[in-house]
Image: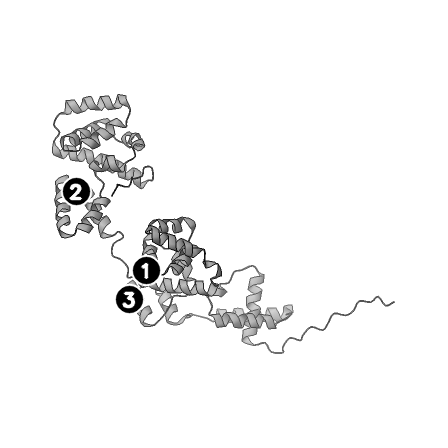
Amino acid sequence: MNTALAPFPDMPALPATLTRPQKAAIIVRAILSAGAELPLKDLPEDMQRDLTVQMGGLNTINQTTLDQIVAEFIDEIKNIGLSFSGGFEGALSILDGALDPQLVEKMRREGGIKKTGDPWERIIGLSVERLLPVLEVESVEVCAVLLSKLNVSKAAELLGNLPGDAARRITYAISLTGAVTPDAVLKIGQSLASQLDSVPPRAFDNGPVERVGAILNFSPANTREEVLEGLDKDDEVFAAKVRKAIFTFANIPTRIDPRDIPKITRGIDQETLAMALAAAQNSGMKEASEFLLNNISKRMADTIREEIQELGAVKEKDGEAAMAKVVNEIRELEAAGEVFFVAEDE
């Protein structure tokens, strides 16, 4: 019985002359074999397809041929002085940060140019404030895809900012996204990215409500009330939003959790606290003064009440300064995440 092994089938012969696409496929294969990463997904689809076809048509490459191709590739790289790739969009990317942002977006729209790369990478990194307007105008199907692509905490925060009915419809639509194809998700991402990119850059980080509220927070009480009364006459809706953005000494009983009062008073010296409470009692904010006194230790409260009696009438300027220190302490703790404002009832 002949036990000799059967010979291996003949391997297809390597073409005598390799084409440039074949050499490119060999270089890519060699780089990937070395463990390096290549952003091939950023190539146009036709180039990705051609590369795959070329790699599929090749077989074994001997070491001598590989060395020759690599050497040829290195020589070509060395001879490149500057590379201008990507056409008009590539030029805009190179000049990113050097040109006026509004001009860049205008040229992109006029040229019908879309930003390259995965649009969802940009969308996912945007703030809730930038994404919320999209949910308010897009269809529930598009909103469902958007929320599905975001991390859970950001998606939950967005839903929490929507009216209950809209949030329920979008949530139900998420259950129907199982059959959505990757191509459809990519097109939705491109459409949303284009829509978001077309929003002109803002000159201010905060909106007008936040800016006016921040200014009035540090204004004297009389000035603040005069401004708000004027806003009520000019734009009642805007005035209502500003009032909600303002936090003053008078807001303490309705915006601060009683359990946080000891934490707040620890950062204020007793003399300043007594001055602030005395001023509050003399200026129509007795409720705020009593709220603070009722939520600290009885011993400390009794001591401060005695100091208030001794102080008697407090100069308006000194009282305003003391109350401002209490408010600033609360705001600093709130910014640090150590206390949280309670939402006021409508």
**Left or right: where does residue 149 sit relative to residue 232?**
right
Point out the tag, 2 or 1, that comes first from the N-terminus: 1
- From what the image shows, is residue 166 above or below residue 188? above
Sort mark 1 into few (<14), some (14-19) or many (20+) by Cα contacts within 10 Å.
few
Instruction: Look at the numbered disc 1 and give the secondary structure of its residue.
Output: helix
Residue 49 is situated, as x and y percent measured from the top left of the image, at 52, 71
Label 2: how many Cα within 10 Å (few below 14, some 14–19, many 20+): some
Label 2 sits on a secondary structure element that is loop
Along the viewing direction, whichever of 148 and 201 lies nearer the viewer: 148
- The quadrant in which the C terminus is found is top left
Asked if residue 59 lies left or right of residue 321, the reply is right
Q: Is residue 178 visible?
A: yes
Colour pattern of the rendering: one colour
Quarter of the picture containing the N terminus is bottom right
How far apart marks 2 and 1 lie (CA) works out to 38 Å
Find disc 2 in the rendering and name its residue: 219
What amino acid type is highlighted by mark number 3?
A: Leu
- Mark 3, Cα crowd under 10 Å, few <14 / some 14-19 / many 20+, is few
Circles 2 and 1: CB distance less than 8 Å? no
Q: Residue 58: percent from the left, percent from the top?
A: 61, 72
Q: Which residue is mark 1?
A: 137
Q: Which residue is mark 3?
A: 103
Q: Amino acid at mark 1?
A: Val
Q: How many callouts does the rendering have?
A: 3
Residue 319 position, x and y percent, is 16, 32
In three-dimensional space, the C-alpha distance between marks 3 and 2, rounded to whole angstroms, equals: 39 Å
